[in-house]
Image (cartoon, rainbow, N blue to C red):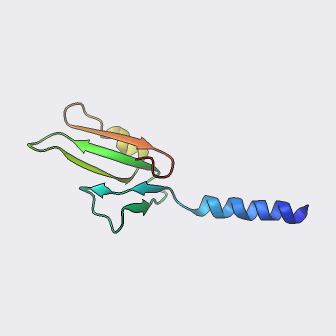
């Protein structure tokens, strides 16, 4: 029984140490189509900027707090989510 509990504890620690994975692209320059987020970027985000002559789009790891601050009707919008590849 102790072995089973220890194995579950190790599995839990390993799973928690992996960061959130998000799709990356658009205007954001990425080394691959999937990026692993840091603790500071706690969500996957999709950002659309409509200000200017041509709308632009980017997606990748974002701070959920910063994403909320980027919602300005007619200028920009940001949607964030908190599970792997949700953007």
Q: Residue at x 47, y 51 (%)?
A: 42
Q: Position of residue 56 (x, y in %)?
A: 20, 47
- Residue 43 in view here: yes
The image shows a total of numbered marks equal to 0
Horizontal side of 4 relative to 87 (left or right) equals right
Horizontal side of 65 relative to 52 (left or right) equals right
Which quadrant of the rendered structure holds the N terminus?
A: bottom right
Q: Residue at x 36, y 45 (%)?
A: 66
- Residue 40 in view here: no
Q: Position of residue 45 (x, y in %)?
A: 38, 47
Q: Residue furthest top?
A: 73
Q: Position of residue 51 (x, y in %)?
A: 15, 40
Q: Residue at x 51, y 48 (%)?
A: 83
Horizontal side of 72 relative to 51 (left or right) equals right
Front-most of 63 and 43? 43
Q: Residue at x 37, y 40 (%)?
A: 79
Question: For residue 33, what is the image quadrant?
Answer: bottom left
Q: Residue furthest right?
A: 1
Horizontal side of 44 relative to 47 (left or right) equals right
């Amino acid at each position: 029984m102790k072995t089973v509990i220890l194995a579950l504890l190790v599995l839990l620690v390993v799973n928690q140490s992996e960061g959130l994975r998000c799709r990356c692209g658009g205007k954001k320059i990425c080394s691959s189509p999937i990026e692993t987020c840091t603790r500071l970027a706690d969500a996957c985000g999709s950002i659309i900027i409509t200000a200017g002559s041509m709308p632009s789009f980017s997606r990748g790891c974002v701070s959920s707090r910063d994403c909320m601050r980027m919602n300005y009707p007619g200028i920009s919008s940001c949607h964030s989510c908190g599970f792997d590849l949700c953007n």
